[in-house]
Image (cartoon, rainbow, N blue to C red):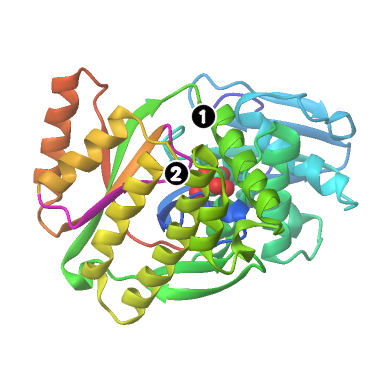
């Protein structure tokens, strides 16, 4: 363990990473999302301190530790993983909550940079811990907003609420159908195994430079399209076809088309899952990928190779997940076919000179909670 040794935790809180089944880049457009929590999670051992200091350490080999005065925290003050737990304390104080010092030790098995929300997992675990230790009494939506503020205001990436709501709101065995307009949601049974299927996650280990700039640019395009259409967000568009015809031909129209079609796909997937027909969601996943590749232009050769190879090996559907420009893809495959699909993707990556991908099967796990 790196960092301080005189550590006394008051408890341990865990918050999972997520895989979004469908509904990508819809959250900041007030649209629909459908994530599941994954078993991998960030665990935060947290102890209250009375001297106003924040001490951070991680079990990750070689990671730095930090000792700062909570009152000195400011956006941009910390970089790397420490910005997330520190950002939670900053965001809570910025929102007017009475929060003092803490010792925080992080232990996470959510792959970093894989598009599986490792940073939101970190923030959510710490937010839940600090809420309890400082008796703030915040509900999960408020905590999700705090964790989002860490990203938008402390770290500086204009994300939506998908990752934080997934980490804090998911329930084992279910996908979380969330309407990002009013943050109302419902749990939809998602039983791949019961349908004889597996949800294979393919971590391409690709991370392209566009990540932050590209994300902000897509979000700005959607806001510009909404402005041109005279609506507060693309969700408020009543007639998508007419809206598309009204937008200038080019990137703006294609970005808006992705959002409109993706929202519709989420609704169809939810309907299929509620009817118990998991197999029926496959084509929607594949259509989502095509839309992100062609209209939203956030795919990359590694993600396209993963998706195309999985489909070529008989996957029922496949798509990139998360922000794009790298990270992970998911493939819905017949149970027992995961190994063959993984082997084919591995070969395709090797043939193209890509880094070796990593694989695991996602099962819908529980959301954030106290574990010790
Ligand atoms: C990232 C962001 C989310 C969401 C997804 C795309 O994960 O953090 O808010 O926008 O990308 O769906």
Q: Nearer the viewer, residue 130 or 223?
A: 223
In percent of width and height, residue 25 lies at 52, 49
**Residue labelled with disc 2:** 116
The residue carrying pointer 1 sits among few (fewer than 14), some (14 to 19) or many (20 or more) residues within 10 Å by Cα, namely some
**Residue labelled with disc 1:** 211
Cβ of mark 1 under 8 Å from ligand 1: the answer is no
In percent of width and height, residue 215 lies at 56, 36
> Range of the magenta residues?
314-325
Question: Which quadrant holds the C terminus?
Answer: bottom right
In percent of width and height, residue 161 lies at 62, 53
Q: Is residue 87 visible?
A: yes
Residue 323 in the magenta stretch? The answer is: yes
Q: Nearer the viewer, residue 231 or 8?
A: 231
Q: Residue at x 23, y 55 (%)?
A: 317
Circle 2: element type = loop
Horizontal arrangement in the rendering, residue 225 relative to residue 189 (left or right): right
The residue carrying pointer 2 sits among few (fewer than 14), some (14 to 19) or many (20 or more) residues within 10 Å by Cα, namely many
In percent of width and height, residue 44 lies at 60, 45
Q: Main secondary structure of the magenta part?
A: loop
> Nearer the viewer's eye, disc 1 or disc 2?
1
Q: Residue at x 8, y 44 (%)?
A: 340
Measure the alpha-carbon separation of dots 1 and 2: 14 Å
Q: Residue at x 51, y 46 (%)?
A: 253
Q: Quadrant of residue 359?
A: top left
Circle 1: element type = helix
Residue at the far bottom: name it. Answer: 275
Q: Residue at x 21, y 68 (%)?
A: 279
């Amino acid at each position: 363990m790196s960092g301080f040794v005189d550590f006394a935790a008051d408890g341990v809180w865990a918050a999972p990473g997520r895989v979004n089944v469908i509904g990508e880049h819809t959250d900041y457009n007030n649209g629909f999302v459908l994530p599941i929590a994954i078993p991998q999670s960030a665990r935060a051992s947290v102890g209250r301190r009375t001297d106003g200091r924040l001490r951070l350490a991680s079990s990750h080999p070689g990671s730095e530790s930090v000792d700062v005065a909570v009152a000195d925290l400011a956006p941009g003050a910390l970089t790397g993983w420490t910005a997330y737990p520190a950002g939670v304390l900053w965001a809570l104080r910025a929102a007017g909550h009475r929060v003092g010092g803490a010792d925080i030790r992080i232990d996470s098995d959510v792959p970093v940079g894989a598009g599986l929300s490792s940073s939101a997992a970190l923030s959510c675990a710490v937010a839940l811990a600090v809420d309890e230790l400082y008796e703030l009494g915040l509900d999960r939506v408020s905590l999700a907003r705090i964790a989002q503020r860490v990203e938008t205001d402390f770290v500086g990436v204009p994300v939506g609420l998908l990752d934080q709501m997934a980490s804090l709101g998911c329930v084992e065995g279910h996908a979380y159908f969330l309407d990002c307009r009013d943050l109302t949601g419902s749990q939809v049974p998602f039983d791949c195994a019961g349908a004889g299927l597996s949800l294979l996650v393919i971590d391409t280990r690709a991370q392209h430079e566009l990540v932050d700039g590209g994300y902000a640019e897509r979000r700005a395009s959607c806001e510009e399209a909404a402005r041109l259409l005279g609506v507060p967000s693309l969700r408020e568009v009543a007639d998508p076809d007419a809206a598309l015809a009204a937008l200038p031909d080019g990137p703006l129209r294609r970005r808006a088309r992705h959002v409109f079609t993706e929202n519709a796909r989420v609704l169809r997937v939810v309907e299929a899952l509620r009817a118990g027909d998991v197999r029926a969601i496959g084509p929607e996943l594949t259509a989502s990928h095509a839309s992100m590749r062609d209209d939203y232009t956030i795919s990359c050769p590694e993600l396209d190779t993963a998706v195309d190879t999985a489909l070529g090996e008989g996957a029922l559907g496949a798509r990139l997940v998360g922000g794009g420009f790298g990270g992970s893809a998911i493939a819905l495959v017949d149970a027992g076919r995961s190994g063959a699909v993984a082997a084919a993707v591995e070969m395709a990556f090797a043939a193209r000179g890509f880094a070796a991908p990593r694989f695991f099967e996602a099962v819908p796990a529980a959301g954030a909670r106290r574990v010790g």
